[in-house]
Amino acid sequence: MCFFYFHLCGYNVRLVNSTNSCYGRVEVLRAGQWGTVCDDGWDASDAAVVCRQLGCGTVLEVKNAAYFGKGSGPIWMNNINCFGNEATLMSCSYNATPNRCDHEKDAGVICEASSVRLVDGSSSCSGRVQVLHDGIWGTVCYNGWDLLDANVVCSELGCGEAKEVKLAEYFGKRQIWMDNVNCSGNESALSKCEYHELELNDCNHSEDVGVICQSVMRLVEGFDDCSGRVEVLHNGKWGTVCDYKWDGSDGAVVCKEMGCGNIKVLTYGAYFGATSGQIWMGNVNCNGEEAALSTCAIQGWGTHKCFFAEHAGVICGLPVRLVNGNSSCSGRVEVLHDGQWGTVSDDGWNLTDAAVVCRELGCGDVIKAKGGAYFGQGSGPVWMNSVDCVGKESSLIQCNIDHWQHNNLDHLHDAGVICSGEGLPEKEACKKM
């Protein structure tokens, strides 16, 4: 067995087969050819060096057994032994001739990902852009900000391409850290773009920048944007999720990532139609706290136990209840947000908005939309104001609203509704949460 203790300058490192440049299967470039790393002896100290080398912060999870799929070509490294403080993986000791390994044992890593996040948006892929500096999160100034810059943020966070650039306090206020950001669009992280020194910015928070990303997940053939068959984008191709062991924690992550509130119904099989395309994810195992489905444990990209028409799906929605009425289908409208129940203001509240609540609760048609705290004054926050529904939405969260929480409103204007109380029959092959 031969071990090398010196730095081979001909090596480069990358993380592949994921939606983010800061997690994936570890590959190294040697003699002009990319190859994998065997997971024999692969541990947190080794993975930490990869994260540091790639500018991806600290290690979050060590992955083994081809977690990010099996690679191809040579297996360049085995029995890596890092102290954890090395600058590059090639500075660690390792076996360069791993004859007993195959690609079933390819090593992977999930790093801290970046010092960038999107906050106060409707999902993990939209919000005000924040960067971490000296342990404090701050905002980015709008000066020079464009879609190329936004694309880098979306790509860094595993959120696909940028759909919209936002500014002027769209998502709120924080300390400003970056100004005049200038990305080419090909950078792997916002920190690698050109920008003005932090202390030189001359911005105020009316110039805070935000972004809405495309995301790498979608719900198709559903009733609306918050229901349907779950599909994920991988290697430039959309595919489905196997419904084997599909549960509430997995569905909760999907709803959260899509900005659709909470999981209400899990669906299986061809509930939302069948497709013969690629099945990308199988045996998904989320704990429910993840911001994106792509960060949950899976059997491996393209590895699954499903056949045709065994697709995972969801129906999401905002937790809504009617209180202080004569039945479960009449009362003051309350919604659950940030773990706390609050009310809806009657500003703009009409039959169209109320109809969505009736539909969401399975309470049939709307009879009356009530305002002026008709069902008594609530307590806690007034979460929603100026609700504007089209009328076809399956959940109140899909309607346009003024921003969440209104400290200047009182409960004298709490909205209510009276529904007919006759719900619609459910389809089969689904499980209510």
Image (cartoon, rainbow, N blue to C red):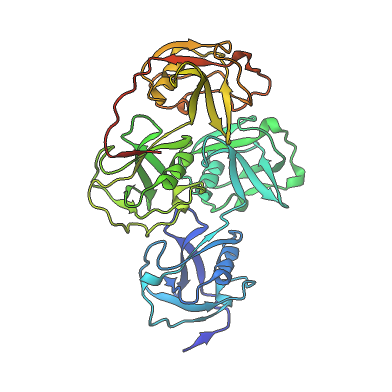
Q: Nearer the viewer, residue 48 or 227?
A: 227
Q: Residue at x 34, y 29 (%)?
A: 223
Q: Residue furthest bottom?
A: 1
Q: Residue at x 51, y 16 (%)?
A: 416
Q: Residue furthest front?
A: 326
Is 228 situated above or below 88? above
Q: Residue at x 43, y 71 (%)?
A: 36
Is 349 situated above or below 28? above
Q: Nearer the viewer, residue 308 or 77?
A: 308
Is 286 situated above or below 380? below
The x, y position of residue 77, in whole percent, is 46, 77
Q: Nearer the viewer, residue 292 or 138?
A: 292
The x, y position of residue 327, in whole percent, is 45, 18
Q: Quadrant of residue 314?
A: top left
User: Does residue 381 appear in this view?
Assistant: yes
Q: Is residue 166 left or right of residue 239?
A: right
Q: Nearer the viewer, residue 285 or 426?
A: 426
